[in-house]
Amino acid sequence: MSDSRIPPSRTAYGEELRKRREAAGLTQEKLSEQVVMSRTHIAHIEAGRRKPAPDDARRLDQVLETGGVFARFLPTLDGRPVAHHFGEVAEFERQATMIREYGATLVPGLLQTKEYARAVFRSYFPPKSDEECDEALVTRLGRARILDAPVYPVLWALLDEAVLRRPIGGPAAMAAQLRHIAGLAARQRVRVHVLPFSAGAHSLLESGTKLMWFDDAPPIAYVEGLYTGTVHDAPSVVFNCQAAYDLALGDAWSHGESLALIKAVAEEYEHEER
């Protein structure tokens, strides 16, 4: 991952850890044994790519006899807000080997068609001009090109049934959107599961969620709300997001059942359009 995207606070924290470790005469491997962390995770912390969990920071302080430096400055490294742009997350998408996403009210951006996305942008406040909508469309559709790669990323999309039932852009746009999802799912790299209304309350009710895994870095979670979104890479937070996703997935229909429903709802929209 590019150093230009690492916040200065992460860089300074990692550099301080490296200096303290070397002053103690410890290699990353030796330090990892004493603080019960993987050597790779320590390397990522020193590079500024990740931060330790609170318990890990306390053990680093204890082993390196720092007087609590790493635990005390840990809150300054909390998840980074991305309320006004999606650039960082889009970069993570390009590097991910696995993406698991929950769509609470909308089709996830990577699966959106042009007309569906245009209808979404038209609903924004403040309103977007035609030029702004066109620019946003180019960006959103460009993100989906990662699915043209031969192997990675693998994408799992967990969709609330509301995503299928809300006619964004009208019947024709919705029919095309659902057919598009079904077509992608036929390629095996994309798995789709519908979380039905009958499931009632579930563990992802409160927000949209995206989980990403990488070959050369720990996993992250991205949680999004109105006008805001936050990237989380603290291991405990990521673990909780993963567990919540798994719980909700357990309440969803199978891939085959979900595709059958998606196609059936697409037919309903096509019939309505006729």
Image (spheres, helix red, strand yellow):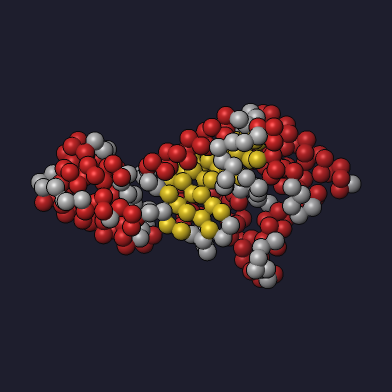
Q: Is residue 24 visible?
A: yes
Q: Is residue 207 left or right of residue 197?
A: left
Residue farthest to the right, as pictured = 274
> Percent x, y for residue 161?
69, 39
> How many numbered dots are placed on residues in this image?
0
Looking at the image, which residue is at 64% across and 40% down?
A: 159
Question: Residue 164 lies in what quarter of the image?
Answer: top right
Q: Is residue 137 left or right of residue 10?
A: right
What's the residue at 27%, 38% (across, down)?
38
Does 106 appear above or below 197? below
Q: Examine the image and state in which quarter residue 62 appears.
A: top left
Q: Is residue 59 left or right of residue 8?
A: left
In the figure, residue 31 lies in which quadrant?
top left
Instruction: Residue 129: give x, y in percent of width and height.
Output: 68, 71
Residue situated in front as seen by the camera: 141 or 30: 30
Q: Position of residue 148 (x, y in %)?
A: 57, 46
